[in-house]
Image (tube, coloured by chain):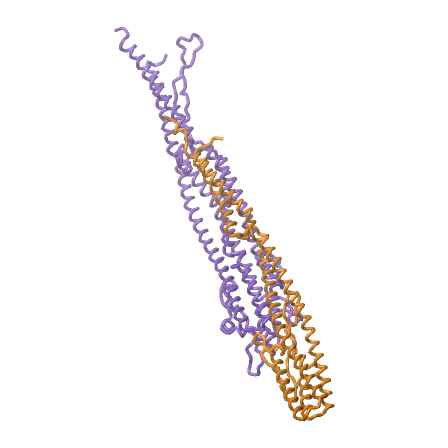
Chain colours: A orange, B purple
Amino acid sequence: MRITQQMLGSNITSQLQKNLSRYEKANEQVSTGKRINSPSDDPIGVQKSLKLASQLADNEQYERNTDYALSWMETTDQALNSISNALQRANELGLQALNGTNSPEDQQTIAKEIEQLRAEMQDIANTKFDGKYIFNGQGTDQPIQVEANGDLTYDNQSILQRMSSSNTIAMNVTGEVFDGNVNLFKALDQLSGALAGGEKAGISSALEQIETGKDQVLNSWTSLGAKQSRVEGMNQRLKEENLSLQTLVSKNDDVDFAEAIMKLKTEESVYQASLAASAKIIQPSLLDFLR
Amino acid sequence: MTSTFHGLEVGKRSLYTQQTALTTTGNNISNANTPGYSRQRVDMQATSSITYPYQTGSSSSQLGTGVSVESIDRVRSEYLDSQYRERNGQLGSESTKLETLQQIEALTDEPGDNGISASLDRFFSAWEDLASNPDSLAARAVLVERSEELLSQGQTLNDGLTSLSKSLNEQMKAVNDQINVLSTQIDSLNKEIASTPEANELKDRRDLLMDEMSGLTNAENIGRLEGLQQSVKEVESFQKDLNEMFNQLINGSVTTDVNGTSKQFNGLNDLMTSGFSLVKDANGAMKQGEAMFDTTGTGTTFLESLSMNQEVKANPATIAASSNNNAVSNGAIATAISDLKSETFSFNVADSNVNADASVSDFYGMLISKIGAKTQASERSVESHQAVLKSIDQNRMSVSGVSLDEEMSNLIQFQHAYNAAARYVSTTDELLDVIINRMGV
């Protein structure tokens, strides 16, 4: 082939251009740390990348949901503990009134304390978490209505939290815990009434009611504990899944730095070599040697 | 017999011819870097000889009469020219398409945290937050922001595509103008060449113009012009798909669970208005929710006609999360909307008769992946066209280009021939001097 100066020139420019653009690509990968910088870098990979990012967002969301559910249940747990303590105390006071030799004045004092416990119970029924009445079902903006006779008005619906796309949990305990088989307020009223009237039979039947009430609270509490541990487990699993998803994302999106830097270095030296060679080739022609 | 001055005539012809060759060499060197210039070669031919029987006995011989310039030709291969133009047309078309596809890619800003895909994730995440916290005003405020973000992402991309197709149409006009200018020039060159067929420079100029023309459009209608037409189609179909995605999300028919019962809805807005918001009426019952997006605007595309519902923007409490008009902590509607992320819509794909059944983000992922694959294919095709074009061009330059080394050696060769011819003239002069001045005196 006949080689002309023009050919050399155009060859050199196009080769330099090619080398420089490869150098630039290698540099982009190293400086962004990403293997895929535009969809055309890897059309299949980019879809996977979007999908993984979306899954990761879901997962983080579910993790937030379980965190929230755990805090909510923690508050409920404490409230149930308080109810249980109050009932325990009522039970002790009732037994004391039944067995001991108490003067009518003492009985009156005990009855007053029971009334205090009832007021405390009402406070517990209207426990708030994050500004919400936790025992009033889905009507969390309203407190539970406790009538003077102990009748309760409350919403009995579950508040559902999603822990995964297919897995929901009812995180709330409704007013039913106060008003299941036994209405705790009525039981306390009965006890304080019997104490004030000094009727032993009334006191012992009230104590039976309170005993059943304790079981009722305990049942709720146990099932709450079971739920808590389920949510806790889910939370752990989501955290682990998060980690493995992030690993997948990184595998799909990120460059292998050692490889990328090696490539950058290679491209750099190729570019420099082509510059040096071009500088040598361009200069001489026969002209330089004719005198 | 030859004329007395035959020798002088032979010498003169040689001087003229070598000088022409020297001048042509000079011209080649001068135009070594002129675009489109084909190197020229002097076609020297021995002039016809004369019968010369003298002193040769019976067999008469022929005596040479020197050299003359037959023609000055340009060295060029028409085959390579036609190859070059065909390839250049394909490259012009493909590289225009590539530019457009790369611009679409850049407009989408995928993959990354700033694209629509990430916006969609944040949008649905905000709904899930509301589902988990249905009575929260803060969650609603965030949701309004996320919706606005999603809308503005979609609209920015849509506007970008509109202005891209507008600029492509303008380019098309400019290319058409250029084609007209070029064909007028080629036409007038054709006329000039018809009257002077030997005009090498005019032919070079015409070839250069035709090379340029081949990049814009050629006989097979391939070239930049055709590339622009295809680009406009690409942009339009991507824009259609993008609008379809938002249209389905907001209005599209979807079957989803609310409170465990499967129901059919017409997209996000329908779901939102089917639920109950935090705003209460005089009886204390929760009022029906407002739609997030206002679709009643005017515009040539769906996204242009789309805007945020001002009521919702002003008061996020009007967003419905509850399926029960009496329960603020019911998140059934918000959950159902958050579920739309994975629900299947039936997308009407541009340029296709078959609908694509996919979730919103899968459909968008497919769009991005499709553009990526097209760009990649186009990149490869441009690269291969460039490589082939370059090798054709190299061949052309190999044939027609000026080699300075070659010209320099030619220069020396012609110079020596010129010097020798001059020497021959002075030798002939000396011979004549002997005959005219010294003989018989």
Q: Is residue B332 above or below residue B49?
A: below
Which x, y percent locates residue A35?
Answer: 55, 51
Asked whether B277 or B14 is in front, the reply is B277
For the N terminus of chain B, the image quarter is top left
Q: Is residue A231 above or below residue A254?
A: below
Which x, y percent locates residue B277?
Answer: 56, 75
Which residue ends up furthest to the left in the rendered image?
B441
Q: Is residue B30 above or below residue B290?
A: above
Determine whether, in the image, residue A36 is placed left or right of residue B197. Answer: right
Q: Is residue B293 visible?
A: no
For the C terminus of chain B, the image quarter is top left
Determine whether, in the image, residue B204 is placed left or right of residue B327. Answer: left
Asked whether B357 or B19 is in front, the reply is B357
Q: Looking at the rendering, which quadrant does residue A57 occupy? A: bottom right
Which x, y percent locates residue B221?
Answer: 50, 46
Which x, y percent locates residue B189?
Answer: 40, 39
Q: Is residue B222 above or below residue B161?
A: above
Q: Looking at the rendering, which quadrant does residue A280 occupy? A: top left
